């Protein structure tokens, strides 16, 4: 037996832990101990094994912390991108809503123009040329198509955003 022996308490104090943890390490790793005067003592080679165990454990913890920090940075970056995409989607939806309101207002103003009925068309032929009347009708139809297109686009944007979270 070597002259330098340490009790479990002395080693625990040196390593900044408690006796229970040192005892568990001894049992888990089958490290040899001796009993002197009702105290369990560790020889130099056993102390070295326990120190190595703590050193390896510290390295594993540092690696785990490093990996977790990297993953946290990735998650933060991903959240930032998602936040930007959500903000962009909300701005686009607001623009679409404004355009839709403008198209509806323009459509209502065009509807306010009285389109002559089939019977009275001959009477107003002198007042309003047929070509202008047809142009107004086609413009109303085009505006209605734009409104439908914007509504479909709004629905698609909403679906794409909803699908993103699935």
Image (tube, rainbow, N blue to C red):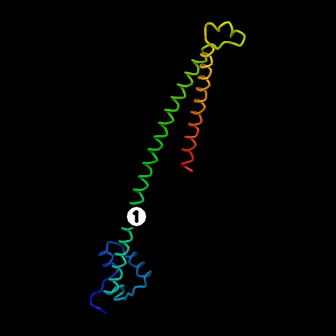
- Which of 118 and 145 lies nearest the eye of the viewer? 118
Name the residue located 61 percent from the left edge and 31 percent from the top edge.
148
Which quadrant of the structure image shows residue 130? top right
- Which of 152 and 4 lies nearest the eye of the viewer? 152
- The spot of residue 77 in percent (x, y) is 41, 52
Please indicate, yes or no, whether residue 41 appears anywhere in the rendered image.
no
65 over 81 or under it: above or below: below
109 over 52 or under it: above or below: above
Name the residue located 55 percent from the left edge and 28 percent from the top edge.
100
102 over 114 or under it: above or below: below
Name the residue located 41 percent from the left edge and 79 percent from the top edge.
25
- The spot of residue 2 in percent (x, y) is 29, 91
Please indicate, yes or no, whether residue 36 appears anywhere in the rendered image.
yes
- Which of 47 and 59 lies nearest the eye of the viewer? 59
Helix, strand, or loop for circle 1?
helix
Q: Which residue is mark 1?
A: 67
- The spot of residue 59 in percent (x, y) is 36, 72
Q: Tell me if mark 1 has few (under 14), some (14-19) or many (20+) residues whose alpha carbon lies within 10 angstroms of its own.
A: few
- The spot of residue 3 in percent (x, y) is 27, 90
């Amino acid at each position: 037996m070597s002259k330098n022996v340490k009790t479990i308490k002395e080693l625990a104090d040196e390593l900044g832990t408690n006796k229970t943890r040192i005892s568990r390490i001894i049992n888990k790793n089958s490290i040899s101990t001796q009993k002197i005067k009702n105290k369990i003592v560790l020889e130099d080679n056993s102390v070295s094994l326990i120190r190595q165990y703590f050193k390896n454990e510290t390295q594993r913890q540092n690696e785990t912390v490093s990996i977790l920090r990297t993953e946290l940075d990735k998650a933060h970056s991903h959240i930032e991108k998602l936040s930007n995409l959500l903000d962009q989607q909300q701005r686009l939806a607001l623009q679409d809503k404004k355009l839709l309101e403008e198209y509806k207002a323009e459509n209502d103003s065009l509807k306010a123009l009285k389109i002559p009925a089939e019977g009275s068309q001959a009477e107003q032929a002198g007042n309003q040329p047929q070509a202008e009347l047809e142009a107004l009708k086609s413009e109303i139809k085009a505006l209605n198509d734009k409104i439908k297109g914007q509504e479909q686009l709004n629905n698609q944007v909403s679906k794409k955003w909803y699908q993103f979270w699935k």
